[in-house]
Amino acid sequence: MDDGQQAVIATAAVEQSLPTATATLPATATLGPTSQPSPTPEPLPSVRIIAAEGNLYIRRGPGTEYNQVGILKKGESAQVMGRDVLSKWVQVNIPGTEFTGWVSLLTPFTKLEGDLSDIESFTFTDWPLPAYIKNCTEHDLLIGPNELYLYNLYTNGKYLNEVQVDPGRYDIYDLFIDGEPKIQTLDVREGDIIYITVDGSGTEHLCP
């Protein structure tokens, strides 16, 4: 056997000893559940409330006994989100915020645009906390602007020196001093019990 034949046989032996390359296909990806797009909420009916003749208070709930949480200034409007089934109040988006509050329809300052019957109604069940002003002085007092008469502390047994009020600002006047001077201004919030302990003469008293 010559050298050329030996070279061919050696080459063939080497080729037979090499492993055969097998193409490995990538594993097929297993798909999970098909992702469904979130349903788009239906837009609210276009109903707006306008502060047409003056500023409107926005309150925490549908009633004057709830705290003020915002104000709708004259000329401003707000989207109506809901309405209370028990009263003439509508739930609105407070302008410039992500919060809601309630506006009364029982005032000539309000104007509605749109059909209110298209807005869903519900009962607001977060009841307000009562607020009180109590007179601990020996003088009878007057609470403005509501003109509420508040008797002196000697009538405490009959609770005539205490009155329940809505949240808001009140001026207190001393009826036993000439000129009935204003002696105090109060900012009342839900749940407050405010004791008046100083009369118009500057005399301080303790509540019994």
Image (cartoon, rainbow, N blue to C red):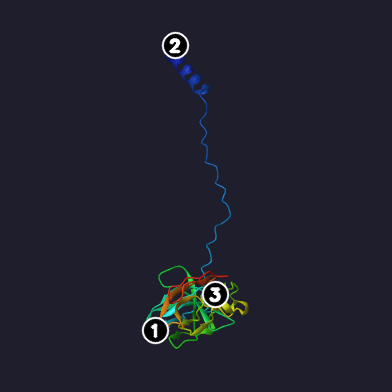
According to the picture, the residue beneath numbered tag 3 turns out to be: 132
For residue 129, what is the image quadrant? bottom right
Residue 1 to residue 158: above or below: above
- Total numbered labels placed on residues in the image: 3
The amino acid type found where label 1 is placed reads Gly
Q: Is residue 62 left or right of residue 51?
A: right
Residue at (44, 85) in percent of width and height: 110
Q: Position of residue 23 (x, y in %)?
A: 51, 36
Circle 3 SS class: strand
Q: CA distance from mark 1 to mark 3?
A: 28 Å
According to the picture, the residue beneath numbered tag 2 turns out to be: 2
Q: Earlier in the sequence, mark 1 or mark 3?
A: 1
Q: Nearer the viewer, mark 1 or mark 2?
A: 1
Nearer to us in this view, 39 or 3: 39
Mark 2, Cα crowd under 10 Å, few <14 / some 14-19 / many 20+, is few
Q: Is residue 32 left or right of residue 187?
A: right
